[in-house]
């Protein structure tokens, strides 16, 4: 890749990181009020889903304990829904290229996301990392220092560190790729496989579940 192309990627990655940081700060600073029972029970909640205050109308204190507990739970759920809705509003500008980033995902350091990327809940992406167009990143996936080209599916719980993944691959649940591993194109890496020490996977290879563990 030419030097000016690399510079362009790094500039784009820096902008993504700065915007993500601002969005996360805005979410953390949010406060919403959830209610139930026409406002008789109120819960003040932060963007981190921490409950700061619960207010119960005195008229309810003589009511049935189970009913009161249900009303508190309903107010908490109302606050959570409001936080999620406002979080989506804050995160939406980061997805102008069609990318979808779950509010609980974390992006740290320079990361470039291609058009239409989807990042699931609890995923953690650490730069320098490039994720190509239309990739789907599952829940609780860890990616660090990786180059992942277009149209890849990375299943829940997978971990990719210091590796390269080509086009159109399927990386299974809890699979681990690390330490210079290179996966070519249109491969299937089954669940629980562990590939490191510079392993090269040829195009269209299919590895069954737990076929390799180094």
Image (tube, rainbow, N blue to C red):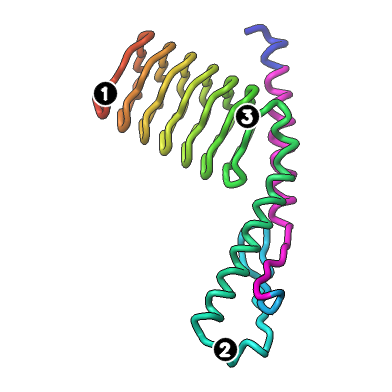
Label 1 residue SS:
loop
Give coordinates of residue 23: x percent, y percent: 72, 44
Q: Nearer the viewer, mark 3 or mark 1?
A: 1
| Residue placed furthest toward the bottom | 62
| Spatial CA span between label 2 and label 3 | 53 Å
Q: Which mark is residue 208?
A: 1
Query: Would residue 24 appear left or right of 181 to someone viewing this image?
Result: right
Q: Position of residue 168 (x, y in %)?
A: 47, 16
Residue 102 location in percent, x, y? 59, 41
Tell me the quadrant of the picture where the N terminus can be found.
top right
Give the label on residue 111, or none. 3
Work out whether residue 190 or residue 58 is closer to the camera in this orientation and state it: 58
Q: Is residue 203 above or below residue 110?
A: above
Task: Give the residue drawn at x 36%, y 10%.
Answer: 204
Secondary structure category for the residue under label 3: strand
Mark before the other along the chain sequence, 2 or 1: 2
Mark 2 / mark 3, whichever is N-terminal: 2
Magenta region: which residues?
8-37
User: Among all residues in the image, which is located at the extreme left?
Assistant: 211
The disc, 3 or 1, on the residue closer to the chain's N-terminal end is 3
- For the C terminus, the quadrant is top left
Residue 91, magenta (yes or no) = no
Give the left or right position of residue 29, taking residue 127 as reference: right
Q: Is residue 63 left or right of residue 3?
A: left
Q: Residues within 10 Å of mark 1 (few under 14, many from 20)?
A: some
At mark 2, the secondary structure is: loop
Query: Residue 158, located in which quarter of the rendered image?
Result: top left
- Residue drawn at x 53%, y 38% as measured from the top left: 120
């Amino acid at each position: 890749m030419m030097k000016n192309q690399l510079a362009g990627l790094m500039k784009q990655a820096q902008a993504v990181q700065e915007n993500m940081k601002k969005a996360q700060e805005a979410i953390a600073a949010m406060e919403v009020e959830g209610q139930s029972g026409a406002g008789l029970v109120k819960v003040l909640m932060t963007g981190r889903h921490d409950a700061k205050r619960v207010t119960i109308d005195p008229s309810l204190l003589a009511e049935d304990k189970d009913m009161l507990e249900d009303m508190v739970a309903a107010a908490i759920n109302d606050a959570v829904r409001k936080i999620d809705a406002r979080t989506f509003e804050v995160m939406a500008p980061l997805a102008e290229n069609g990318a979808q980033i779950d509010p609980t995902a974390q992006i740290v350091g320079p990361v470039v996301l291609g058009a239409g990327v989807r990042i699931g809940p609890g995923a953690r992406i650490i730069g320098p990392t490039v994720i190509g167009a239309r990739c789907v990143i599952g829940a609780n996936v860890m990616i660090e220092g990786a180059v992942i080209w277009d149209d890849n599916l990375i299943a829940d719980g997978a971990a990719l560190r210091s590796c390269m993944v080509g086009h159109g691959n399927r990386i299974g649940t809890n699979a681990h790729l690390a330490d210079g591993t290179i996966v070519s194109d249109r491969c299937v890496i089954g669940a629980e496989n562990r590939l490191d020490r510079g392993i090269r996977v040829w195009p269209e290879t299919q590895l069954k579940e737990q076929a390799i563990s180094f």
